[in-house]
Image (cartoon, helix red, strand yellow):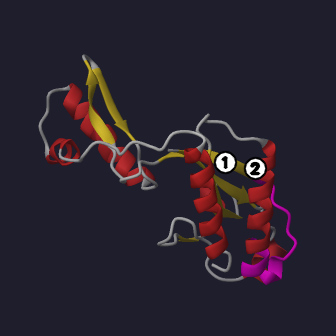
Amino acid sequence: MQLFLYAVMTPELDAETLKALGGQSRWGITPSDPMDTTVRRNDSGQGGNRIVTRTCATLAPGHQIGAGQVARAARVMQCKFDDRFPQLRGMKMDYSWAGHLCLTLNSVSVMRRLDEGLFSGCVQNGLGTARGTLTGIGAAELACGVDSDITRHFAAEVQPRRLPPQPFQRIGANAVLRYKEWRARDD
């Protein structure tokens, strides 16, 4: 499944805003439910004093989304930001964007030899750095003929489950995503 996740980022927070915000200069909250909101506060050591918010998702089988989808997600995140940071209510975001995420219905990765000289390390299922690094290492090890705990782990996974045909896939997945977004509206 080709999902797009959305995020927004505040402008650089000035000294007065940082004082009003208070708290630690660097932190992050990652929810246990993927549809809940991820929030990160960066400091000058991470490229600037900013807050990044991530929530909302869209299934886009054609690997493309439009500006309207980014704008809709940005409106949702603006409301959540205003609720979460009442002392910064109304602060307009400097950036809004979407990023691609690949999932399988049964949450397995694809780390295997696909053809002679062609190896795959993909489908992170929302576990980005950890799973992406492991599948990449596993694919490289397979290409080099190395047998390891990593290659054995991913070789033991079942094949990804087949997706429903279009338009059922797109309509059904986006309906489920909107429901989960609604359910997480107060997070």
Which of pointers 2 and 1 lies earlier in the amino acid sequence?
2
Comparing marks 2 and 1, which lies closer to the viewer?
A: 2
Three-letter residue code for mark 2: Gln
The image quadrant of residue 140 is top left
Residue 134's spot in the image, x, y percent?
30, 46
**Residue at image coords 66%, 54%:** 6
**Residue at image coords 65%, 82%:** 23
- Using the image, determine if residue 81 lies above or below residue 96: below
Read off the magenta span: 81-95
**Residue at image coords 73%, 73%:** 80
157 sits left or right of 24 in the view: left
Marks 2/1: CA–CA distance: 9 Å
- Using the image, determine if residue 61 lies above or below residue 56: above
72 sits left or right of 186 in the view: right
Circle 1 is placed at which residue position?
98
Circle 2 is placed at which residue position?
69
Residue 25's spot in the image, x, y percent?
63, 73
Q: Nearer the viewer, residue 173 or 32?
A: 173
Helix, strand or loop at mark 2? helix
The image quadrant of residue 145 is top left
- Using the image, determine if residue 101 lies above or below residue 85: above
Does residue 142 appear anywhere in the picture?
Answer: yes
Residue 45's spot in the image, x, y percent?
60, 59
162 sits left or right of 142 in the view: right
**Residue at image coords 62%, 54%:** 174
Residue 99's spot in the image, x, y percent?
61, 46
At label 1, counting other C-alpha atoms closer than 10 Å, the crowd grade (few under 14, some 14-19, many 20 or more) is many
Helix, strand or loop at mark 1? strand
Q: Nearer the viewer, residue 27 or 52?
A: 52
Three-letter residue code for mark 1: Ala
